[in-house]
Amino acid sequence: MERHQKVEAFVEKQSKWKEATIKLREIALESGMEETVKWGGPVYTVNGKNIVGIGAFKAYVALWFWQGALLKDEQKKLVNAQEGVTKALRQWRFASTDEIDRDLVKAYIMEAIDNQKAGKTVKIEKKKEVIIPPKLASALAADERLKEQFEAFSPYKQREFAEHIAEAKREETQDKRLEKSIPMILDGIGLHDKYRKA
């Protein structure tokens, strides 16, 4: 099934929001974006990057802006649907087709497209501090080569070893996990490397 037909199938499925969905789709297509289907709904992209998507819910139809947090939003139309969870994603909700102001929606979309073309994105902080458990800290302090090899790992891999040892409830289990980890660290092998695709 072509993308175009999939989007039409999505539109046809809407009983309550069919008219609103058609209107939002027209505006999105007028903006020159590529139309596709992701997560079961229409998504509009520029150079393969998601710009906006259309979603239909019980109480409203919505336009999702993937980098909505960067929009000026002078009209205060955008909401964070998952406060504290999503950093960049914003949603514009419409409780009726009459609420869809074609020019205003298009202005928001064009700003989102311009931001994408300019390379503007919300930087997602994924850094989590590496907390070295006492047993591992002692082993690293006692062996310079072990310390150097451990520090050569990415913070993500360092955290895997640290958490693997620290999460053991019993001291003997922590000792066994440390004993198993030391040769791997010395050989530059991450704790879960064997499960990762090359």
Image: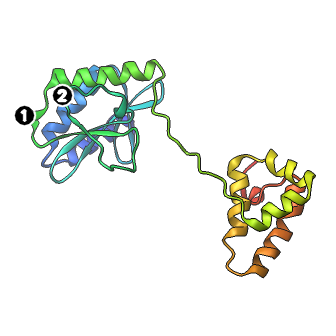
Label 1 vs 2, first from the N-terminus: 2
Q: Position of residue 36 (x, y in %)?
A: 39, 35
Q: Quadrant of residue 63?
A: top left
Q: Quadrant of residue 95?
A: top left
Mark 1 to mark 2: distance in Å? 17 Å
As displayed, is residue 197 above or below residue 117? below
Q: What residue sits right under mark 1 in the picture?
A: 98
Query: Disc number at residue 75?
Result: 2
As displayed, is residue 167 above or below residue 85? below
Q: Which residue appears at 9% of the width and 40% of the height?
A: 96
24 with respect to 41 (left or right)? left
Helix, strand or loop for disc 2 = loop
Which amino acid lies under the numbered mark 1 shown in the image of this protein? Asp
As displayed, is residue 74 above or below residue 197? above
53 with respect to 100 (left or right)? right
Q: Residues within 10 Å of mark 1 (few under 14, many from 20)?
A: few
Which amino acid lies under the numbered mark 2 shown in the image of this protein? Gln
Q: Which residue appears at 15% of the width and 51% of the height?
A: 59
Label 1 vs label 2, nearer the camera: 2
